[in-house]
Structures are given as structure tokens and as C-alpha cells.
Image (tube, grey):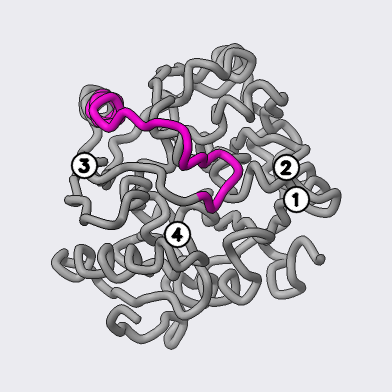
Amino acid sequence: MTAASPLRVSALAPDVSATEFSATARIASPRRYVLCRPDHFEVTYAINPWMNPAAPVDRARALAQWEILRATLEAHGHTVETVPGEPGLPDMVFAANSGIVIGGHALSAHFAHPERAAEGPAFHRWFAARELRELAAAAETNEGEGDFAFAGQRILAGVGFRCSLSAHAEVERYFDMPVVSLELVDPRFYHLDTALMVLDDTTIAYYPAAFSPAARDVLTALYPDAIRADDTDAISFGLNGLSDGEHVFLDPGATGLIAQLRERGFVPVPVDMSELRKGGGGVKCCVLELHTRRDTTARRPGGAAAAHGPR
């Protein structure tokens, strides 16, 4: 599989500023996040290697951990909006999968598995009630920020399990931003956000073994000074974290990653999401970010898809 299409060559310019990390002060910026309460969370099916319907789930504990995450984000100066969960949609708590929102333009998700198919329209209805510049439902298989990571001047995108290359092309057209395709090869890391975390516009952390050799080459070219996580960090869902540019909210079990983050000047903020991990998600899976487009490039006429309703 080609790691990045010829149309995306411009996205492969290296981040020169990444080599200056040792002299760079980390700066937090206020973010806008969307979470969905786990009122209906349970594990009744298995669509990823972490799910086991035979293992008991403590919903009260899951809700308590979720409340701590919400309160922690707010305590660090971020705005949190809450979407109510819907009966029969136990994975709706993983709000990151609901879509992509950049600069007031939103693309709601089109899930790969029938068990989650109704989440796309459910979140689309929530988006439609907001004041957005534009809203569309994805036509291609696309699980939102699960596989699309906004990285300042580009979008990093996973392919191999839940997302198709045609979805990458759709996202590139819709947001008029370069998309870099990265092949995932380990089914335990079925979404990009389980194997890669954007720390700021020029810095990422990732687990190399989750990616194909071609994808690793692309990441090395783009981010030569990236933080590389080990097996323990990855299995602990440490890369399923969230950064505001300074603070990094992540699983406390990723001790090696936490140490590396401190060395780079980031401030780790451990948040235990172990009960929700029974569904295959951690901190980032529970959070959709409403991104502000930080570049000044105007969207090309016709570059965005026309708005339309849920499938």
C-alpha cells in the first residue's frame, strides 16, 4: 500500500521546527471538547480485540472515570460540551469517532460495523443543532478522529481496519487540507488514535510497530524528533491521549511515555479510563475536539462537499 498518494506530496515537507524542541517552551491553548456520557455503556459484542462480552462491566465505575476526565479537562481551562448517549448505542461514549470538526466545518462519521452504524446519524443530529459553517455526512467509511488527527497544516490519517483510502480523499476534499495516509497493521491498534498522538502542530508521539514500513518511513521523514512509545506504553493506551500543547491527558500506565513527555517539556496529566478500555477506548476515544483552523489559507472554491443530511 502506498503510504501517501502523489496528490499529497506537499504534505510531506518536514517540520523543521521539530528539531528545536529542547529550546521551545510548551504553551497550552484553550480547547473546545465534546464528550458523551456513558449512561448506556456496556460490552455486548466484540468488534475489536479489547472487547470481551463475557467480562463484566461496571457502568457506575465507567461513569465515575468519565466524570473525572470531564472535570480534569475543565479544570485545565477547556470548554466541554456533553452529548447525551442513546439507548442501544453503548459505544457512543467514544465521541472521538463521531466525526471531524475543523474551523466550523463538520463531517459526521460513517461507521464500519453495523453495531455502531446508528451513531453517525445520532451525532449528525447533534451537529445540526449547532451553529456550523457547514455540515455533511461522510459518504465513505470514516470513523472521525479515530482515524483522522489534525496536525496544524496537515491531517494524519489511518487506513487498514476502520477507514478507507477513499475516505482520506473525501476528507482532503472536504476540508481542503493535505491528508497523509498511514497504514495500520496491528489489529490491537485498529484506529490511528490508539497508536499516534498529536502533541502540538509539529510534535507527535507514536508506536512504530503499529504501522507498516512505508508508513514508518513517512512518519520519520515528517517528524524526525517524534516521541516513540514502547509496547508497554501502547498496550496501556498511553497514545490514546489528548494534548493542549502543554498538558497531555493520558493513561497512568504509560510510564515510559510519561517520562519522555516530561523530558520534552510537556506536563503529563494521568487519567484512569480502565473501565471504558473494556470497550477498546481511552482518554482520546472519549473526546472529540472542535478544532480552530490555525492557518490562514482560504478554502478553495468548490473545495468543500455540499451539506447534506445523515445517511
Residue shown at 67%/21% (left/top)?
A: 232
Q: Earlier in the sequence, mark 3 or mark 2?
A: 3
Instruction: Left or right? Give the position of 230 relative to 202.
Output: right
Instruction: Give the residues in magenta.
Output: 46-69
- The circle drawn on residue 144 is 4
Name the residue beneath numbered marker 1: 185
Residue shown at 65%/71% (left/top)?
A: 165
The vertical placement of 241 against 306, above or below, is above
Q: Is residue 202 visible?
A: yes
Q: Earlier in the sequence, mark 1 or mark 4?
A: 4
Q: Label 2 neighbourhood size at 10 Å, few (<14), some (14-19), many (20+)?
A: many
Q: Nearer the viewer, residue 204 or 44?
A: 44
Q: Secondary structure at mark 4?
A: helix
Amino acid type at circle 2 is: Ala
Measure how far apart labels 3 and 2 are at the Cα level.
Answer: 32 Å
Q: Earlier in the sequence, mark 4 or mark 2?
A: 4
Residue shown at 69%/41% (left/top)?
A: 16
Q: Earlier in the sequence, mark 4 or mark 3?
A: 3
